[in-house]
Amino acid sequence: MQISRIRQLALITWGFHNYLRRPLTLEHAIDDVRHRMDNREKNFLSIAKNIIYGNKYSPYRKLLLWAGCDYGDLEDSVRHEGIEKTLEKLRDEGVYLTLEEFKSKIPVCRNGLTFETTEPDFDNPFLMGKSIQASTSGSRSKGTRVMYDWDFIAEEAASELILYETHGLTALPLALWLPGLPAISGIHNLLMNIKFRRPPEKWFSHLGSGMIRPSLRNRFAMQYISWVCRMFGLSAPPIELAGIGDAVKVAEWMEKAKRSKGKCVVRTYTSSAVRVVQAAIDRGIDIGGNVIFTGGEPLTERRLGFMESAGVNAFPRYVATESGLIGASCANRTPPDEMHVYLDRLAVIQMQRRTNIGEHNINSFLFTSLLSTTGKVLLNTEIGDFGRLEVKPCSCLFGELGMNVHISEVRSYDKLTGEGMTLLGSDLDDIIAGLIEDAGGCPDDYQFWEKQDDKGLCNLIIAVSPEVRNLNENNFKNVLLDKLRGRSSGAGITSELWKQADTLQVVRAYPEMSKGFKKLPIIKSPKNPYL
């Protein structure tokens, strides 16, 4: 086991040398993306043949064969009808995975077919032993493990470089306001940017070493990355603590960069972007004309309007740990979060389903992997989001490359999101149910509410019935965050950020009921007059 681990580390470190040895230029990035666009069908069929049909443990293989679709049938359909039409036909025949099935929370059940899965069943077997591992912010014991390799990150770097070029930002100074390891978001952005030789000048982290202490392996990884970067004449910035209450540090850097370079770019979570703008307004700091790339939460009209009131341009990015980059802001956007889907990497269709939020039908997104470098294999798979999907031409660089699928109004269902961190409502429910029971309550005595303030910052509210008498609200919240912290490293990061931002609130109120007098587990924009 130890020899195997040493071999894996050797492959990863050698891979990083090769990753940096070949810098990415805009010309190469465009050529790479165009090549992948020209070979979408070929790439998809390669994944289907080798990673799905060639893997007897693949859940997708079981679904496809149950639906009477062998590889020859799939290939014939793709050749004649294209990827998306084939995926729609498969969806209608029952070949898809709901979020709960993908997370292995419930068995996969279709007419005459039932089987259970584990999360490793969706891993790409060809990445075993040579991949970098990350995990989602889920509250289960280890979160959802996701593997990345250097080829995958290089493909994403090409997409990111084209995004910068689309908005005319390639040469501008950059800062990150994202957590360091064990969180994946900060290191992910750093690695993409150094591939095309535009490392950030500053890296602010919401978390300090005293909050979530990185493992020895993670500390070594950061030191190693810095050392190898220096070998190639690059500078990886040291991580500087800037908690949620320290947004002014980021605003001050933006003002300084604006004075010296005329404009700058910051990448952070959407709520954090709002906090930077608020800090600048409160302190009279001039950050007008600068750009913030947002992610982790929707860039709503309210949030965008608030940032634009300070002269800041905000552009959305759509990323999921399971899939990597999904989409990025269109230069000709109409709704604030209109994005081009990275069609060289993913296919996306929609499925109408009924959700616990408001008991209404939504068009959830089903994603499919197109590249063999993917860590998690997706085939008509939900990741918990829904929104608007539109096919139309566009004159921006993404459109010229054939990326004509636009995605907007992206929202989550059955998930709770705050400060860029997302948990399944059922994951948090596992903790709260026990605490409510200890206080003498029952499963119908509480409910999750999501509410945004006038700037778009999100509060997650736990409404506890007044009938639960043996409950101290402040102690309840602290115990909840402590229990969440102990579930996994990702959940620990979520707990710390929510604690800093005071995201969780506890109120005494009876849970709201649906029109059918059912208690819904999650309510978006509750009607309670006391909030």
Image (cartoon, helix red, strand yellow):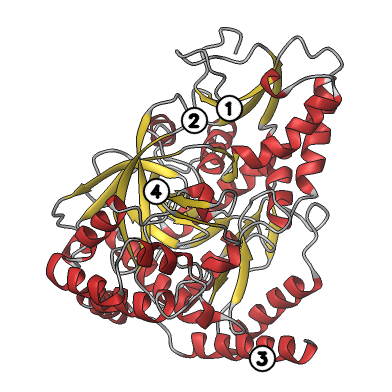
* Disc nearer the start of the sequence (1/3): 3
Q: Which element type, helix, strand or loop, lies under badge 3?
A: helix
Inter-mark Cα distance, 1 to 3: 47 Å
* Disc nearer the start of the sequence (3/4): 3
Q: Quadrant of the C terminus?
A: top right
Question: Looking at the picture, how far across and down is residue 252, in whole percent?
Answer: 58, 47
- Give the amino acid type for the residue marked by disc 1 in the picture: Pro
Q: Which circle, 2 or 3, is nearer the viewer?
A: 2
Inter-mark Cα distance, 3 to 4: 36 Å
Q: Nearer the viewer, residue 366 or 324?
A: 366
Identify the residue under disc 2. 356
Inter-mark Cα distance, 1 to 4: 29 Å
Identify the residue under disc 1. 521
Inter-mark Cα distance, 2 to 3: 46 Å
Q: For the point 35% across and 53% down, which residue is it?
A: 94
Q: Nearer the viewer, residue 20 or 44?
A: 44
Residue density around tag 1, few if under 14, some if 14–19, many if 20 or more, within 10 Å: many
Count how many numbered circles sit on residues in the image.
4
Q: Nearer the viewer, residue 386 or 497?
A: 386
Q: Name the residue at the front extreme.
A: 112
Q: Is residue 66 left or right of residue 357?
A: left
Q: Quadrant of residue 88?
A: bottom left
Q: Quadrant of residue 17?
A: bottom right
Identify the residue under disc 4. 316
Q: Is residue 99 left or right of residue 33?
A: right
Q: Quadrant of the N terminus?
A: bottom right
Q: Which element type, helix, strand or loop, lies under badge 2?
A: loop
Inter-mark Cα distance, 2 to 1: 7 Å
Can the viewer see residue 196 in this picture? no
* Disc nearer the start of the sequence (4/2): 4
Can the viewer see residue 331 in this picture? yes
Identify the residue under disc 3. 10
